[in-house]
Image: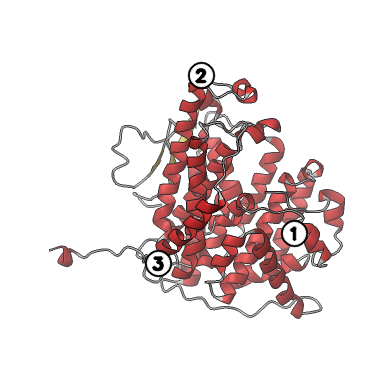
Amino acid sequence: MSVTLLRTVLEVSNSSGLFDSIRNAKLLGSSKFMSQDMGSIRAKHDKKKRRQFCSLSVNTNYACVGQPGLEGAGNFPLLSNVLANPAAGEVVVSSEQKVYDVVLKQASLVKRKLGSTDELEVKPDIALPGNLSLLSEAYDRCGEVCAEYAKTFYLGTLLMTPERQRAIWAIYVWCRRTDELVDGPNASHITPTALDRWESRLDDLFQGRPFDMLDAALSDTVCKFPVDIQPFKDMIEGMRMDLKKSRYKNFDELYLYCYYVAGTVGLMSVPIMGISPYSQATTETVYNAALALGIANQLTNILRDVGEDANRGRVYLPQDELALAGLSDDDIFAGKVTDKWRNFMKSQIKRARMFFDEAEKGVLELNEASRWPVWASLLLYRQILDEIEANDYNNFTKRAYVGKAKKLLSLPIAYARSMVPPPRKVSSAMKA
């Protein structure tokens, strides 16, 4: 599990003028890349036999391979990891397999670097050209951004060690900047070339050559922690997808998109959040739960924002499942809540909840100091699905949101759950 919340708080938090304020703090500096290709970045409002990983089903449901009880359930037929493509005469790997290959790589890296005791050897700060003190200033600014625009999450980070705090702040800011490229006020000016240059900057910062002060904070973070570059590159790939794709023919395509734009953050964050020294779960299982939370949150975003996306000409819903329900894009653009739409939404909400169920298992395995913000994210986002139901599935003209009172009630619940230690295996002797 992890703080996939890093991305989802972009929707939970009220924010405006984020990167205007960063520019005023003179941390972004002058950038030909920024001015020529992206404009200013501103914030908007708002291989085991029984491996376990997020698996797709041929209907609207979800199952987890290797999870007892689900394989035998007739309601959850699984989609094969390898898809036949007779027309091309070749075999195509499914999205779930592509993503799981990344999960295995990340888990292996963490196991090698951190070891089973979750001990972290913190390396010294990297030397910046000119002034080492600027690195501390950059981290401080990342923390200020997090505190201002992701208040609940920021409070949770205060329970972490200073090194983990700063690292999570740096990742949060990079993800937010990346998201704003295609989802901010200057999105219409963003080109594939701009994203290529943003990825080139990413390569440079991973090599210890940060472009600006906020890059420097992340460059230092990836130097200290076993964070791999692939999830960062995959997030940028998700931004490319947003530039050229506005329809998804099936859930396999949508799953890959959800991984790119949200599941990636979980993979970035696991080595920072840390795994409990008492956890007996495999590293792959923890990563799988982090991925599940990212997918669940993004599916929730999609279901909540159907009307807003339709106004932009976008439909982030599986086209084959819409057709099976007797619906089409025209029905979505018309924005009428019908019985067909209600039934369709029920199946989509059911799938999102199953991803949340899988994610919950992994929160328990995190380092104790990292659980609270993750639990808060999970509980708050899961309630959005309840609000969609309360609105009679009208996500065309009504925006489902969790009120302040419910948010406040969720925080102590999340804190209480964060105190629950990981489940321990019972030996056969004890059972006897």
Task: Indicate which disc, 3 or 2, sits on the residue closer to the N terminus.
Answer: 2
Amino acid type, mark 2: Gly
Question: Looking at numbered disc 1 in the image, what kind of residue is underneath it?
Answer: Arg
Tell me if 221 is positioned left or right of 214 in this view: left
**What separation in Å lies between label 3 and label 2 (alpha carbons)?**
46 Å
Q: Are marks 3 and 1 in contact (CB under 8 Å)?
A: no
Report the residue marked by disc 3: 419
Badge 2 local density, few (<14 within 10 Å), some, or many (20+)?
few
In the structure shown, which secondary structural element does the residue marked by tag 2 occupy? Answer: loop
The numbered mark at residue 201 is 1
- Residue 35 is situated, as x and y percent measured from the top left of the image, at 86, 53
Whether residue 86 appears in this view of the structure is: no
Q: Which residue is mark 2?
A: 326
Disc with the residue nearer the chain's start (3 vs 1): 1
Tag nearer the camera, 1 or 2: 2
Q: Earlier in the sequence, mark 1 or mark 2?
A: 1
Residue at 65% over, 46% down: 237
Quadrant of the image occupied by residue 80: top left
Left or right: 8, with 59 as reference point:
right
